Image (cartoon, helix red, strand yellow):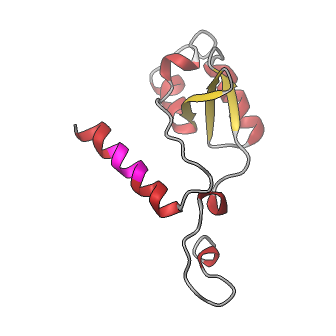
Amino acid sequence: MAFAKMINTFGMFFMPKVKDLMTKSICTLDINASLNDALLALSEDNMRSVVIMDGGKPVGILTRRDLINLVYIKKMDAEKTIVSEVMSHPVITVDYNENIFKAYERWFKIILETNYS
C-alpha cells in the first residue's frame, strides 16, 4: 500500500512526504506516569507505542516490547516505576512535510552516530 502511494495519477514515481505515510493517531502520556499507566493506555488504544510528553513536547517513547521486557522479564514494579526512568530518548522528530526518504536518511544517520560513535 505504501508503494502505491508513491505512484501518482499519471503512473509517475514521486517522493512521498512523511504525512503521506505516517500514523495519524498516537498514544501519549505525561512524563510522570507509571509503567502501569503505559500498559493500560496501550491496551485500551490497541497501540504499539506511547510517546512520553513533558510540557506538551515529546521527550521519550516506550513500546509494547519495552514494557513486556521491563515488567515481565526484568520484574520492575509497574505501579512504582515512572516512565521517565525507562523511556527511550531522545525522540527523533521530523517535519510532516519532509520527504520520506530524506527523513529516513536523517534518522539512519542519527542511529549510526548514536550506536557507533
Task: Name the quadrant containing residue 58.
Answer: top right
Q: Relative to 10, say whether 71 is above or below.
A: above
Check the picture and name the quadrant holding the C terminus.
top left
What's the residue at 61%, 21% (across, down)? Answer: 35
Report the magenta stretch's main SS: helix
Q: Does residue 107 belong to the magenta stretch?
A: yes
In the current view of this chain or complex, which residue is farthest to the bottom? 10
Magenta part of the protein: which range? 106-111
Q: Relative to 10, say whether 39 is above or below.
A: above
Task: Name the quadrant containing residue 48.
Answer: top right
Q: Is residue 42 left or right of residue 71?
A: right
**Depth check, front residue: 51 or 117:** 117
**Depth check, front residue: 89 or 100:** 100
Q: Is residue 9 left or right of residue 65?
A: right
What's the residue at 69%, 32% (across, down)? Answer: 28
What's the residue at 60%, 17% (across, down)? Answer: 78
Res. 75 visible in picture: no
Q: Does residue 13 belong to the magenta stretch?
A: no
What's the residue at 46%, 30% (across, down)? Answer: 90
x and y percentages locating residue 95 in the rendered image: 58, 49
Q: Is residue 104 left or right of residue 7?
A: left
Q: Relative to 50, say whether 102 is above or below.
A: below
